[in-house]
Amino acid sequence: MVQSSAARQGITKSLSGANATFNNKGKPMELRLSNMIAAKAISDVVRTSLGPRGMDKMLQTSKGEVIVTNDGATILKSISALHPAAKMLVDLSAAQDVEAGDGTTSVVILAGSMLGAAEKLLQKGLHPAIVADSFLKASVKAVEYLTEMSSPVDLNDKSSLLRAASTSLDSKIVSQYSSILSPIAVAAVTSLLTPSSANVDLRDIRIVKHVGGTIEDTQLADGVLLRQPVVTSAGGPTLIKKARIAIIQFQLSPPKPDMDNTVIVKDYRQMDKINQENRKYLLNICKTIKQAGCNVLLIQKSILRDAVTDMALHFLAKLKIMCIKDVEREEIGFLSKSLGCKPISDINAFTEDKLGYADLVEERDKVVWITGIKNPGKTVSILVTGANNLVVDECERSLHDALCVVRCLVKKRALICGGGAPEIHVSQMLAQYGQSIGGVGSFCFLAYADSLEVIPMTLAENAGLNAISIVTELRNKHASGERDAGVNVRKGMISNMLEEGVVQPLLVSTSAIELATETVCLLLRIDDYVQAR
């Protein structure tokens, strides 16, 4: 950042004053430098993945599974970081993923750049507490400047929502399918909105993955999808019209003795008697289910024993009851809300008033479709398809980011341009403000402002452009009042990001700056490392 000679002399003078330097060359300084090196190493790992021209990472899990992605949160979650400071940056990316859902790579890159700026300040003799305090003040001003340059968005304006979702998908492996995935993300989130909505719970949006077909076949389902196939081993039905659906949380299997008790069978007559009792027990349960009017049964997965035995499946098939087993515990709440039915934990509580109703339940390509639900809840199901597991998994991650971007616009209804334009604008505004306050804080503000330029610099580098000339030209354009000018990596030049349709939610940028600054300040305030028991 260009600074006037008068400002530099004033800062140098203030630094050379009494009590202005911090020259602790012992353990605390070494520890801080160690933390900074470890954290910046994590930042460098994901830096090449930023932007539409960013590179992808191939990850191999401990189980031998291969993941190809450029999603920052996924990359860092797979890294087994040992250094405590490195783990903090992994947690930082996870926190950004929870808060905004997007910007998980940017937040780590910003933190690494801020740590580099802080390291230079510490080497010049500034006290870590002063640097941390100044950085926090700078982040507050940065959020103010971002809010000033944002433009309000109306949730009824679908074109603005589509542009934001498309910008999120442009940096993904599946970017060529953004015209298909963006409308799905917008439609899914907006369908959950109410006039008083201040947020959207993404747990009400269920993504079902299916290997087969292409990404173009991905669709928003009209109803509820189940990834568990229908059990057909006993010859049960795979299509039910006018379905009456029950969700049960008990097992269709004979009761077993406690761990402390043992059943000893001395001859075959006793064995026959046990089998007869088991058969009678299961038949009574299946008849109770049928008498309640149920013809589709969803069974929760059991950890201790089989959720349903072969004998029970035989009885259910004879009674023309469709059976779907191994429904995960986490899915019960979603299915209950979607189908308008209540989970049943005991056969004695199995009554007709706990059933859900639908026009059709059928299995298509190992995916169960429940359509024409009588009392549907406010939930959405999305079917994601692809040629193999790698493609399907990456498509799911990309779609999740797009959903999060639209949700961000519900939480904070404002858009800003992308392409590094906000960072350059905030950097220049902070530099002007820093020169006006004077003192040691001024020096910290200027360093903080410089650190924000890492985003446009990285975008240019990853696009194969001359980063120094691009950033210099960006500064000049913003200095002349073109605050929406950013790096157009597709055309290899600087252009107006709003006109290009490159926009992102305000919440993504403000959250990234706030979380990155908090993490950096936390690292700066650490002066010792103690191994706890």
Image: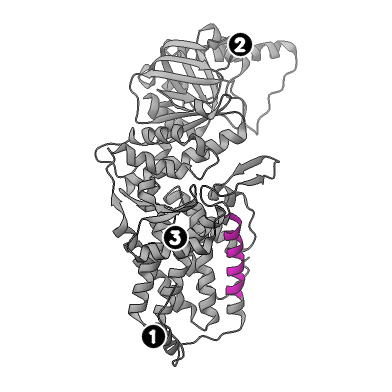
Residue lying at the far bottom in this picture: please name it: 18
Q: Residue at x 45, y 44 (%)?
A: 168
- Please state which amino acid type lies under the numbered disc 1: Ala
Q: Secondary structure at mark 3?
A: helix
Q: Which residues are magenta?
A: 31-46
Q: Could you say where residue 405 lies in the image, as x and y percent from the top left? A: 40, 44
Q: How is the image coloured?
A: one colour
- Asked if the residues shown at circle 3 and circle 1 are in contact, with their CB atoms under 8 angstroms apart, the answer is no
Return the mark for residue 6: 1
487 on left or right of 155 = right
Disc 3: which residue: 515
Please tell me which of labels 2 and 3 falls first in the chain: 2
Relative to residue 399, is residue 141 depicted above or below?
below
Residue 200, located in which quarter of the rendered image? top left
Q: Residue at x 44, y 92 (%)?
A: 17
Q: Who is closer to the viewer here, 154 or 421?
A: 421
Residue 473, located in which quarter of the rendered image? bottom left
Disc 2: which residue: 234
Q: CA distance from mark 2 to mark 1?
A: 87 Å
Q: Could you say where residue 450 lies in the image, as x and y percent from the top left? A: 46, 69
